[in-house]
Image (cartoon, helix red, strand yellow):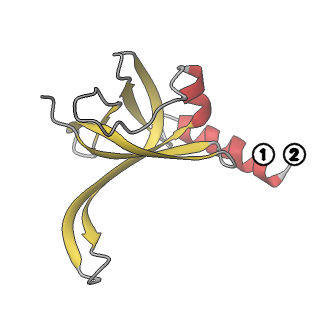
Amino acid sequence: MSLRATAAADIQNIVRDASTGGDEIVITSPAGAVATVHGFTSDVHLSIDPGTGEMVSGRKASVAVLIADLVTESFQDIHGVAESTSRPWLVTMTDANGTETTFKVVETNPDASSGLTILFLEEYVAS
């Protein structure tokens, strides 16, 4: 088995291990279909201003999920929806304090080599 295949298999085992790996997240399609998958979550409230190099308050959230899990759930076409009049893809996750937050997907960054895709998120407020 190649190094890449070994790494991809290891990533799948780590992400899907509920006790030591990824967190359970819920993804909702614009049509209302729902899938529960495991992934690595990130929700950071501090950024670096690229113009000044200064730290500023700014929320950045993302999840890393297995492409194979998205394919299994028929969610392989997940993407950001720019139009505010259209329903976005949604991701609901729970933070370390047990607070559940729903985000909308604004960008995706798939990595076919590792078998992961990163979903970049922003907080979602239902209108």
Outermost residue, left direction? 127
Q: Nearer the viewer, residue 98 or 64?
A: 64
Q: Please name the residue shown 49% across and 43% down the image.
A: 20
* Residue 69 as seen in the image, left or right of residue 35: right
- Name the image quarter holding residue 57: bottom left
Disc 2 element: loop
Mark 1 residue element: helix
| Residue 23 % position (x, y) | 42, 38
The one nearer the camera, 76 or 2, is 76
Residue shown at 77%/47% (left/top)?
6
Which quadrant of the rendered structure holds the C terminus? top left
Q: Up-down: is 25 above or below 55?
A: above
Residue furthest right in the image = 1
State which quadrant residue 97 falls in.
top left
On-image quarter of the N terminus: top right
The answer to whether any part of residue 88 appears in the image is yes
Residue at the spot x=41%, y=46% of the render?
A: 107
Taking the image as shown, residue 62 lies to the left or right of residue 76, namely left
User: What residue is pinned by disc 2?
Assistant: 1
Mark 1 lies on residue: 5
Image height check: is 46 above or below 65? Answer: below
Residue at image position (33%, 45%) is: 121
In the rendered structure, find residue 98 and report the number of the disc placed on it.
none
User: Label 1 amino acid?
Assistant: Ala
Residue 42 in view: no
Q: Are marks 2 and 1 in contact (CB under 8 Å)?
A: yes
Residue 30 image position (x, y, % from top left): 35, 22
Distance Cα–Cα, label 2 vs label 1: 6 Å
Rendering coords of residue 75 (x, y %): 50, 25
| Mark 1 closeness class: few <14, some 14–19, many ≥20 residues within 10 Å | few
